[in-house]
């Protein structure tokens, strides 16, 4: 018995050493500024969220954050840069599913594997999104919209923010779940798609609530439904699309942080904790609420599972749309 106990001592010491090393790393890191590569140009949305959280994260981490916008290629340029970076916690990517999930499925020769080359940190927020129609559309809710579309087969279209975008995928999943044949009209981004609906060039679109509300207040469009599984707290009387169309599931549209694969878990957890604490401060929470951004702040393990499940949802939509890698 004594011999067996003694034989365990080296193993016990090794385990203790490993945990001690991880703890020491978390304590020591960071010792220099951290680069946050944002996969879009400066402006509202992803870039705003990254910069709004920055000052609070600096307070928590004790080091400066250096923001670098690398737009282009649907996020592939920025994502590739982070995938190649040293896994030391000093290079972090701020991205969306279109850059991590759909880019993998629709871009030939992509220089990284999203499931192998990144260490998920946290999905910070997800914007509340909506189905909006021009004020002239003879429908006051999703049920009436579906009835109107079915009475006009092949005549109703929806605007999206581009081929392969989350709102393109939303339209295809809506068609399948509702049994409709609404035609897709792609635009370069969300704002022109919304403006097309305002001008009644296209009768409907799917867009972030923050993009829709100014036009709603002006009486140009109506919000018929929220795309998420839960209602938007500031619009409690507006039902979700899923309440009318069972089986409808919007593809994920989070804004999240990822590090290069191999980044130590202790570092990932510190970054995740700094994001969560930043989002808990009253001023940040209020600004995100004003912009209809739902706070997530999940753990690295939870975020990894969310990304994997997102591949399944997007794969379904891409198959329905008949899209092929280009």
Image (cartoon, helix red, strand yellow):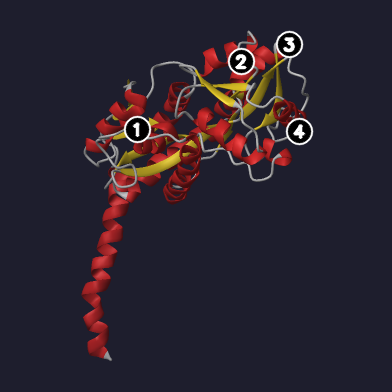
Q: How far apart are marks 3 and 2 (CA)?
A: 16 Å
* Disc 3 secondary structure class: loop
Q: Is residue 61 visible?
A: no
Q: How far apart are marks 1 and 2 (CA)?
A: 35 Å
Answer with left or right where residue 187 lies relative to residue 206.
Answer: left
**Residue at far bottom of view:** 1
Q: Quadrant of residue 95?
A: top left
Q: Nearer the viewer, mark 3 or mark 2?
A: 2
Question: Residue at 70% of width from left, 11% of height from top?
Answer: 220
Label annotation for residue 236: none
User: Of label 2 and label 4, which has the lower sequence position?
Assistant: 4
Q: Nearer the viewer, mark 4 or mark 3?
A: 4
* Disc 2 secondary structure class: loop
- Residue that carries the numbered disc 4 in the rendered image: 143
Question: Residue at 21% of width from left, 74% of height from top?
Answer: 10
Q: In this view, does 150 lie above or below 8?
A: above
- Residue that carries the numbered disc 2 in the rendered image: 202
Tell how many labels.
4
User: Of label 4 and label 3, which has the lower sequence position?
Assistant: 4
User: Of label 1 and label 4, which has the lower sequence position?
Assistant: 1
**Mark 1 Cα within 10 Å, few/some/many (few <14, many 20+)?**
many
Question: Residue at 45% of width from left, 43% of height from top?
Answer: 315
Question: Residue at 28% of width from left, 51% of height from top?
Answer: 24
Residue 213, percent across and down? Answer: 66, 18
* Disc 4 secondary structure class: helix
Observer-nearest residue: 281 or 263?
263
Q: Can residue 183 be seen in this view?
A: yes
User: Of label 1 and label 2, which has the lower sequence position?
Assistant: 1
- Residue that carries the numbered disc 3 in the rendered image: 219
Q: Nearer the viewer, mark 1 or mark 2?
A: 2
Q: How far apart are marks 1 and 4 (CA)?
A: 40 Å
Q: Quadrant of residue 287?
A: top right
């Amino acid at each position: 018995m004594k011999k067996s106990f003694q034989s365990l001592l080296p193993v016990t010491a090794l385990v203790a050493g490993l945990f001690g090393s991880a703890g020491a790393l978390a304590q020591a890191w960071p010792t220099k500024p951290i680069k946050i590569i944002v996969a879009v140009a400066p402006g509202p949305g992803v870039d705003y969220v990254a910069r709004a959280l920055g000052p609070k994260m600096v307070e928590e981490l004790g080091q400066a954050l250096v923001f670098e916008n690398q737009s282009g290629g649907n996020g592939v340029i920025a994502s590739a840069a982070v995938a190649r970076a040293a896994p030391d916690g000093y290079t972090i990517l701020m991205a969306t599913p279109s850059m991590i999930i759909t880019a993998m499925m629709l871009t030939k020769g992509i220089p990284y594997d999203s499931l192998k080359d990144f260490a998920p940190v946290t999905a910070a927020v997800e914007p509340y999104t909506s189905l909006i129609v021009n004020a002239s559309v003879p429908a006051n809710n999703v049920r009436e919209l579906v009835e109107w579309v079915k009475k006009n087969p092949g005549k109703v279209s929806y605007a999206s923010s581009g081929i392969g975008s989350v709102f393109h995928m939303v339209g295809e999943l809506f068609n399948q779940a509702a049994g409709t044949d609404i035609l897709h009209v792609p635009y370069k981004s969300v704002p022109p798609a919304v403006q097309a609906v305002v001008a009644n060039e296209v009768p409907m679109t799917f867009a972030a609530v923050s993009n829709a509300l100014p036009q709603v207040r002006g009486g140009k469009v109506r919000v018929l439904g929220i795309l998420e599984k839960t209602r938007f707290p500031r619009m409690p009387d507006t039902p979700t699309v899923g309440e009318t169309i069972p089986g409808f599931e919007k593809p994920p549209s989070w804004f999240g942080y990822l590090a290069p694969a191999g980044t130590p878990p202790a570092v990932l957890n510190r970054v995740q904790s700094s994001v969560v604490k930043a989002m808990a401060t009253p001023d940040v929470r209020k600004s995100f609420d004003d912009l209809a951004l739902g706070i997530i702040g999940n753990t690295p393990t939870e975020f990894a599972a969310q990304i994997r499940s997102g591949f399944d949802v997007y794969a379904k939509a891409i198959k329905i749309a008949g899209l092929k890698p280009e």
